[in-house]
Structures are given as C-alpha cells and as structure tokens.
Amino acid sequence: MPGYETKILDDDGQPVRVGEIGNLLVKGDSTCAAYWNKHEKTKDTIEGHWIRTGDKYAQDADGFYVHGGRSDDMIKAGGIWVSPVEVEAALVRHPSVVECAVIAVADDDGLHKPHAVVVLRSGVSPGDAIAFELREFVKKSLAPYKCPRTIRFVDELPKTATGKVKRYVLRKLAASEVV
C-alpha cells in the first residue's frame, strides 16, 4: 500500500529469512503516536517511526506475507515459532474434526508444546485412538515439532460474542489439569 513500509524482525530485532516467522512492524503516517496514559505500552509497541503490530508473520519466496497468528498466541517449541493457526488448519482437514484451537502447554520440564482442544463430529468418540490418529494426520503435513503433544476433546470451544475463541479460557483450563 502506498505510503507504508513493513518489515519482519526476529526477537533480537534482526530481519528474518524467507519463510521464517517473525514480528511484523509497520511504518506509515496513520500509525498511532502513543497510547493514552499507557507509557510502558507505548514504549513496548512504538519503535521510532515503526509500530510493532503484535502479529507474527513470514514472507514467502514470492514476497507475500503470511499471517502466523497473534504474538501472544504463538508457541515457541524447541526454540522455533509454531503458529497455532497452521496447526489448527491441519487438524480441521481431518474428517472427524469440526473445529479446534491450539495453545501452548508446559511439559514436565517447563518447555512449551502445542496442545489441541478439539470438537469432534457427531458420532466420533473421543479417546486415545482418535487422538493418536489426529497426531499422525498432522505429522503428514507439518513438521513433527508442530504436532500437538496432547489433545483434549470438548463439546464446544469457549467463544466471545463475535465468535473468536477465548484462548485465555483454554490456557486456564489446561493449567488446572494434568494434560
């Protein structure tokens, strides 16, 4: 878009390679100058003329930007960013899945791993067999480190009035139980 510039940087402020997920920054005349009465938020978000959007993106070989998800929803598994959106897209391609959400859950060593919360189609029984099948299905299209380590089955996902998944509710639920 004329009048705007974008760049994708890693957490150290360095440009990422093609296909690698990083933080999207935008520069243009209409970006905000500051947050009202939120000095720390302003310092965390605005870097000179650039604004940190809070989104993770990658740029493909053709120069197109690919949204990976909100920064606070991303999962850093094994030192590599995992997009919940990408894992969810793989899961919902399975014929038994109606919808799902993927969040980070810490394992026994305190390392974050993808955890899926899945709504199954009517007539499909939740359990270890379908969980194994879903993990194997995801591994066919994504790198193994992106595969959900655990899967929880629910009747419905908690959502806002506008239909967005309340990931904070899922994180709270996962923290209160052994997954």
Image: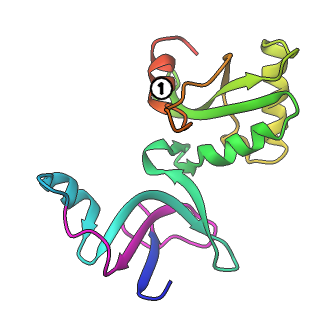
Q: Main secondary structure of the magenta part?
A: loop
Q: Residue furthest front?
A: 161
| Residue 22 located within the stretch drawn in magenta | yes
Label tally: 1
Q: Does residue 12 appear in this view?
A: no
Q: Residues within 10 Å of mark 1 (few under 14, many from 20)?
A: some
Quadrant that contains the C terminus: top right
Q: Is residue 53 above or below residue 98?
A: below
| Residue 148 located within the stretch drawn in magenta | no
> What amino acid does circle 1 point to?
Arg
Instruction: Give the side of residue 81 with respect to residue 169, left or right.
Output: right
Q: Residue at x 44, y 64 (%)?
A: 10
Q: Is residue 3 above or below residue 44?
A: below
Instruction: Give the side of residue 68 with respect to residue 50, left or right.
Output: right
Q: Which residues are magenta?
A: 9-34
Q: Does residue 45 appear in this view?
A: yes
Q: Residue at x 45, y 50 (%)?
A: 71
Q: Position of residue 119 (x, y in %)?
A: 72, 23
Instruction: Give the side of residue 42 with respect to residue 29, left or right.
Output: left
Q: Position of residue 116 (x, y in %)?
A: 65, 29
Q: Position of residue 4 (x, y in %)?
A: 42, 82
Q: Is residue 119 above or below residue 102?
A: above
Q: Residue at x 58, y 55 (%)?
A: 68
Q: Look at mark 1 in the image and give the residue it sits on.
A: 171
Quadrant of the rendered structure where residue 124 is?
Answer: top right
Of residues 43 and 139, the one nearer the viewer is 43
Helix or strand or loop: what does disc 1 sit on?
helix
